[in-house]
Image (spheres, helix red, strand yellow):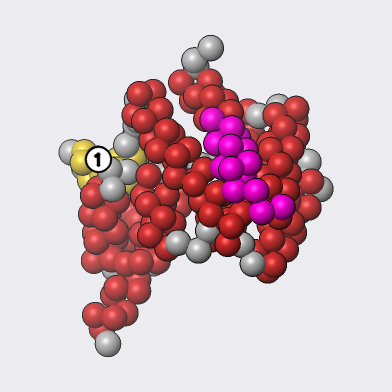
Amino acid sequence: MANTQNRGRSQVVYEHLRGAIVSGALRPNEPLVEAEISERLNVSRTPVRESLQRLATEELIVPRRRGWAVREYSPQDAQNLAEIRVALEGYAAFLAAERAESADIERLQTIHETRLTLNPDQEDERVRTNLAFHNAVIEAANNPSLHGAIRASTRFYFNRPIAHETPEVLMRQGNKDHAVILQAIRSRKPKEAEEAMRHHLNRTYKMMERINFGTP
């Protein structure tokens, strides 16, 4: 029973830290000290240590003299990972157009309609609903192995720092992209869904590249 509880705590800590890293709440080179995390999350150091080791295996954190730090990716690293995500998530949209059930499409529609009501300054909700939309597409593909591969390759999400720097016109364009993806899935047009998702992710990555790395 104790081992099961420890594994459960480790998973909770891991998901919390991973989410904070990929969402931008924890920034590149930010230190991760085992004792401090343990105290902040009110858990023993064992699940924290196990979680940090998992994150290190995923190359999301790197060792430092006093614990760990969030890994800082180079522009080339970011581009390589983005290209993998574009390929995998594009195919997930393809499969979603073939396999999505009515409940999946209703869920996508609900998320999309919620996003249309948001203002630019509602940054947390923009981030949450964007992630929810993409996850709903991936889940509609009904391929757990593909879902796992996308998660493993995704080190950067549309996050609050990006949302803060995104002008309203680009927010509206993102919603238009989602509408095209949703319509292709609803209409059972796999190739169009894949193309729309890849176009959306490529455009979003270029925006993130300019903000994160100052590229033209």
Q: Position of residue 92 (x, y in %)?
A: 51, 51
Q: Is residue 84 magenta?
A: no
Residue stretch rendered in magenta on the structure: 187-202
Image position of 191 (left or right of 111): left
Residue occupied by mark 1 = 62
Q: Magenta segment, principal secondary structure?
A: helix
- Crowd rating for badge 1 (residues with CA inside 10 Å; few <14, some 14–19, many 20+): many
Residue, far top? 216
Image position of 203 (left or right of 114): left
How many numbered dots are placed on residues in this image?
Answer: 1
115 or 4: nearer the viewer:
115
205 or 15: nearer the viewer:
205
Relative to 8, residue 119 above or below:
above
Q: Is residue 192 magenta?
A: yes
Kindly tell me whether residue 73 is visible in this rendering: yes
Q: Residue at x 42, y 49 (%)?
A: 150
Q: Residue at x 37, y 52 (%)?
A: 149
Kindly tell me whether residue 126 is visible in this rendering: no
Residue, far right? 117
Q: Residue at x 32, y 37 (%)?
A: 71
Q: Position of residue 44 (x, y in %)?
A: 29, 68
Q: Residue at x 35, y 24 (%)?
A: 76
Q: Amino acid at mark 1?
A: Val
Q: Position of residue 120 (x, y in %)?
A: 74, 37
Image position of 162 (left or right of 109): left
49 or 53: nearer the viewer:
53
